[in-house]
């Protein structure tokens, strides 16, 4: 649950909050649904009005709710205060460990049935940071999907604040287990260096990437690895360059520069673009271009959740006019 | 932190929340400050933007913040969905046990210093329901205040949902300990029957009260006991009658009937009225009338926290015109 | 699309509109979905941002969108200005005949497939008033459902302004055709008198009902007929009494009186209650009581679309406390 | 300029204000414009953005702005905090004596031209309370209109807070001067008793009226006197009864009872109804009924300014259904 | 009627709409009224609350409503979703052909009376695209004004989506008829090339303009032709350069660059600036500079309708400080 | 009282106002309170709901209200219309001379008590412009503080519109009197040239400053003088460079450039930064850097009143990442 102070006020100055329901799972599922796929979410929501509201919002985004169970009383929340110019935005998390999802027992889910019914499943490194029970559920489900012929997508999404002191050490084995199970991994050179402890003597980010991705792909037998490099030109103007490693070859997209409205969730738009490209048999060049523009558009949209259709993305790739459409 | 859906929408229908910071402590302290006293609050607020916002709101209400410490990351919250007519309002609590207040250690506070500086201290049965650490802090502080010549006020405020199954049994000894320490207690015949396990063969509420209050006052050596009886005439129209037991005599106020805007916090307004009357040496008749009208006005005000001045209450007691003041 | 001026301002006074998407179809489908059934809607929405928004809202309500096609550019709209006290609310329709639904050709739909997949279908007299093409689609689909063993529900919902001068005459044969196809009909004595031209020498509404419903049921071979009588006690207080004719017996619910927040869509809540009772094998007494309370609760909820769960309705039937739930 | 805290918050609780521009002049002129007459306003507005905003709002209401001059820097303002139930609404005036209107010199206006062009002019006792310069302008203009064959309407509207201590004494001669010039006066028995110092030995309001109005009409040679009696049944429910004295005969309207949304400006609606009736040659019975219902409807409308059309008023007089119009 | 989603949400994300009433006619008339002229609008508005609201808004803008008739039930609408950065704004039209204006018969208007009373009349190419009846009304009125010595202004405003496939061919004769009647035409080289089928071998826009405008002026005997060239530097930054052809000479304004808040209606501000300059006898240099800055300021103002006064425009022409005015 | 039209509308376009309470005194006191000092304000607020609201807001900002008296009925107000791009913001003052503060008599305050209790007092040139009574109160208090060993801060803040024609002449002696009493003065070379009539033959601002500040410091025996130079790069982008003259040495901060959200009150943030640096014994280099960044951050915050903590300022000085904090 995202609770955002409207405009540029702080929580102490404000009086009202806009709320919505998001998270990597919601964002990726909704984004691929919007691109024409059927998207299910596997989660547990509280059995109270907060959970009812979350269900409504998730359905509104076009996500099929049939794998969501209802139990417990809490939902992870974060408060968002918008920054302005040189003053950065501020996220304050609360109520996370107690959430219905983080306390749900495994019999809450029907993993076998799910594994039989779906083609592709997406996991996220944020979930991996939660607790042992959740980690174990995650790995069981990944194995079950794999066993049933489905594909596993894993977004490394390492968050230092969630793993705490000495986090990389704690995280390494869990990440390795997930990488071994994955068909498509979202990551960049920093994950390789810090989580997987790979070494490179290159100084530049791009060169490190060229150095390390083949090793990762080889070591963990991962068919496709993709990610982005972000440059913050100024507070409200960012640049983004997507890349994808596949069949021993690293493809970069043209970098794009743009004004930023809402930065959260843009990485999930990139993931959805890669998923769409891979599913539809796009060439690597087309896939990274498509995913990069999908991520760019997600920065211009209110809320965490990408809303662009395939057509919106193609139009933006073709540098259509910026004047109003009428 | 109160998070209220504006208007009559549910959380699932709405998009924005109005937020404020309240609770029995805030309400009573602010109400007595508004009546001309200096009100301090003793609590712990998180050291993050949520705590900053709470501090701002508490200061706005005229509460002196010098006894508030800042620690931890969570604040108890509740969501409020307004009912309409036959559809009741709905409160959903969250993030309560993890709150900075409920996890604060005793060295967080300077109880001795506080005990020396204040005249009257107010405790609430909701706090008593939290956990052993909080209960122990509450009792230590009550004893310290008493030892320094201050007066102790205790509002029974028994909430079944907080004590859970077999709650009355669990609560009894804690309540008795607080009652023994108290100079002024807010309660009614139901607290006597269910928490203190007193028996009466009367059927009518008022008669039970007449039966039981003297026994409570005698048993626990409580100088003053006060409370209210509420009748819900229809969804938006309530009646309220205050009472006060003092010097072996039970005084009832004239009952008042009124339209309800915001019901939460009205009991705290009543408490503040009793405190004000007792502090200022009002007669029992004047005190219960004052407190009853204070509670009535609190039902007509947005938010949990009473805002009436002494003058507002006297005007309403004198049945001043209902036409607009200009 | 409902465009409502917030508060009590007129369109000329206001500056903003709240919008939502509703209609008898949306309301009934969403209400039964909320009662635990799977609800599909059969309609056509424009292929533009207005249609996208309608899709989002419909999905949010838990309606499965798979039978909705996307074509055309218009959606029927109405503006709603809230009345206050003696000043009535005002509805202004626009853009109705040009709507995607009213201009959709039959090949837009897969009637045969739909007829095979569903158990119960609901039609509404408002749709019957639209135009010949829509009327013909409606009857074809009803026949197809019937042929596949499904049940047909028809709500008479006669709107004088839609049929125009001499409307009852124009409408009669179409209504009769629908009645012959129906298993459950929503109507009252006025529909019998004015549309079906039945005569009664009784003066009182209830007696007319007792007189006429058996004739209608007999004539058109309708297993169940249900409806309500509404009394407007004052601008914001209404009374409602549900009834149901089945197996040659007319059952009345206890009348209920209540304060009104939003009157539109309450009849659809009643229909959903009857449908739920019939589907679940409730006794006629329980069904009419359930449906009447469902309709009552719908008057206390923002928007056209009922939101009560089965549990909410049972609680209200048991006269649960009106005080806030916490 | 009216600055109103939305909802039921106080200025200290709120954050935003709704603003509009009103006053007896605006209200009466706009109301008669809405009833089909051409309404001009004679005033001075500040030559700054506040005055620009006032001009826009006045034009929006259908008032012809050609007699409004622009000078000075201030506009009289009042803050409005809505009451709820037993808590009354609160008006706080500010910036009144410094207003452009109250400091405008006479050469700011073209009284002679105005007097030649208009048929009826309306003055208000609130203006009479302002200062000597304004009073003198008011009387000159009344005389000029009279001299050119126009009719003078005067609403006594005595406001104790504006005249201060011993106000009735100060006011008497000014009121008498205006009464001598008037063709139609809005007043009731209290004005007669307190301002004009007339005596009656009757105790009941209505009897006092019957006693005193003929004397007033006779003394000051006033063809028509009209007014209302208001009873506040409860905070939000008022009753109103209009009356009119003409041709030696006192006519009362049927009293009406109604729920109140916004009480300010309802008296001006009554005045506009009397003006409309007199202008259109309605019978006294029809005129008072029309004016009373106009005043009733003005209580159900947001803002000070009446918005009902002649048709709206006739519909309400005929007790049309309270159900929504669609 | 413009229905705008506030902020940067899409219709599917939003919940409220800001509405206003605009269109080339409203914009130009209001802009010239703001520059000190008396502006009438000739149109038909629906006889319902939507039309009432439109009337109020138009009056608020200072437009004299005496030539507006009230008939029918519909008003052309458009929904506006604001873009952000690389995501363009989106306009969705609806209910256009059914509008009161587009279905009004000629006897709805008093063309002869209007033609006698006004000095200058402005027509727009958007209206010319509507239907034959409207086109015929437009031409009759233009001829009548001309016959009475008034001046005719025509803004080409060709909208491809309104004329459809092969639109230029359909439009040509209608445009030519209007051009022959016009004293002042708003157009640029594209209108000359595409509508009037004029040829040029120049490649650059400015050179095409220099080539073609003299031919147009000569062919259709048009005393003054004016227009702008817009360059979109980035999504929110545009440049504009005005020009005017008069007395065989083409005058360009200094180009201006600026940040864009609301792009719609800026062309109408330019037209109003040219009209004002021509009416007041400004030199061509001053007129194009004035009109260009008027258009620039219109981009910085909320809503379609320009609000700058003559003084605001002169200040901006003099590069007054950008710091706040206090 | 600041009354701001939300968004970019003008007062004539808008409907609501956001209000807050500010002014140099509020801003500086609140800013130093936020930096860890105890801040009192010395003022008079009206004894009505407007004053109540001001008290609440001031307390919310962490200002101790014990030196604020309550008297009179008016508060100085200003309306703020936000500019956009090339369109400047507009401030319209009203109700200033009549304010409780400007009409308060000296016995309203306890200057002697205040002088004994505080360490540093801040005065502002805006107050000096009010009237003779206020000027005399200001000087008495400054002398009393000085006599009790406190330090006097004076911000020149010369506002031409408040002093009117020939203002510099009128102001000179009052400014000189304050300068003689001051330990820290906020000013720049323009104050020296125009108010103090000092001459320099330098043309560049910085060189004039280097020329004149030593003379000012010498003449009036002022230990510390500080101020800023602002450059408006474009409408929304400003640059700022702070400076400080102390111990015969003029120190400049690094200039900073930034996007502007709300420009009002930024100078007060600079003052608070200088005060904080001086109080905490920062080096001049650290003090001007700290104050300049404090001022920069104040431009990025909603409202007049700075909200940055010491930590926020240090983070911004260290060029921390602009990406969101989570």
Image (cartoon, coloured by chain):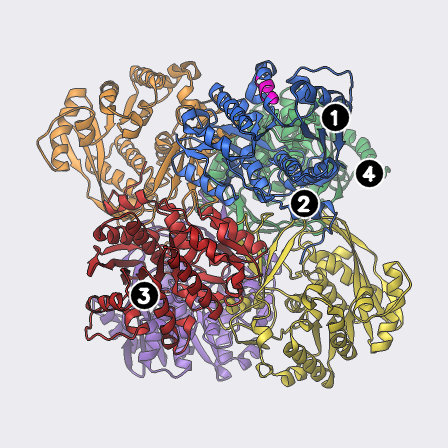
Chain colours: A yellow, B red, C purple, D orange, E green, F blue
Q: Which residue is mark 3?
A: C194
> Which residues, given as a range, are shown in magenta?
F174-180
Name the residue: 48% across, 27% down: F96
Instruction: Tell me how far mark 2 sits from mark 4, CA to CA.
Output: 64 Å
Instruction: Tell me how far mark 3 sits from mark 1, CA to CA.
Output: 100 Å
Q: Which residue is mark 1?
A: F248
Which mark is drawn over residue F313? 2
Q: Which residue is mark 4?
A: E199
Q: Chain of mark 3?
A: C
Do marks 1 and 4 both belong to one polypeptide chain? no
Q: Secondary structure at mark 3?
A: helix
Instruction: Tell me how far mark 3 sits from mark 4, CA to CA.
Output: 69 Å
Left/right placement of residue A204 relative to residue D244 reads right
Q: Secondary structure at mark 4?
A: loop
Q: Secondary structure at mark 1?
A: loop
- The tag earlier along the polypeptide, 1 or 2, is 1
Question: Percent from the top left, x then y, of residue C325?
Answer: 39, 67
Q: Chain of mark 2?
A: F
Marks 1 & 2, CB-CB < 8 Å contact: no
In the rendered image, the vertical position of residue B130 relative to residue E316, given as above or below: below
Marks 3 & 4, CB-CB < 8 Å contact: no
Instruction: Please identify the residue farthest to the left as the structure is shown.
Output: D201
Residue F178 forms part of the magenta stretch? yes
């Amino acid at each position: 649950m995202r609770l955002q102070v409207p405009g540029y006020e702080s929580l102490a100055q404000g009086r009202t909050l806009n709320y919505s329901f998001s998270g990597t799972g919601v964002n990726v599922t909704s984004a691929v649904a919007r691109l024409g796929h059927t998207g299910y979410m596997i989660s547990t929501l509280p059995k109270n009005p907060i959970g009812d509201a979350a269900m409504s919002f998730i359905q509104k985004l076009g996500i099929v709710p049939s794998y969501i169970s209802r139990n417990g009383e809490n939902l992870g929340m974060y408060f968002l205060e918008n920054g302005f110019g040189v003053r950065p935005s501020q996220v304050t998390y609360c109520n996370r460990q107690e959430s219905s999802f983080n306390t749900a027992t495994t019999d809450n889910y029907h993993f076998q049935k799910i594994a039989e019914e779906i083609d592709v499943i997406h996991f996220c490194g944020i979930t991996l940071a939660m607790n042992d029970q959740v980690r174990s559920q995650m790995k069981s489900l990944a194995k079950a999907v794999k066993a049933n012929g489905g594909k596993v997508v894993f977004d490394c999404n390492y968050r230092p604040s969630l793993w705490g002191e000495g986090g990389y050490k704690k995280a390494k084995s869990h990440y390795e287990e997930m990488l071994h199970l994955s068909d498509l991994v979202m990551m960049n050179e920093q994950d390789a260096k810090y989580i997987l402890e790979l070494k490179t003597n290159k100084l530049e980010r791009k060169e490190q990437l060229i150095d390390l991705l083949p090793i990762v792909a080889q070591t963990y037998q991962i068919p496709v690895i993709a990610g982005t490099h972000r440059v913050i030109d100024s507070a409200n103007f960012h640049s983004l360059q997507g890349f994808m490693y596949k069949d021993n070859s690293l493809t970069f997209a043209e970098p794009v520069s743009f004004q930023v409205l809402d930065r959260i969730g843009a990485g999930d738009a990139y993931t959805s673009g890669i998923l769409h490209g891979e599913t539809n048999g796009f060439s690597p060049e087309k896939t990274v271009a498509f995913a990069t523009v999908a991520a760019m558009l997600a920065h211009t949209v209110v809320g965490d959740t990408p809303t662009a259709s395939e057509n919106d993305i193609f139009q933006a790739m073709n540098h259509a006019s910026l004047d109003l459409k009428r």
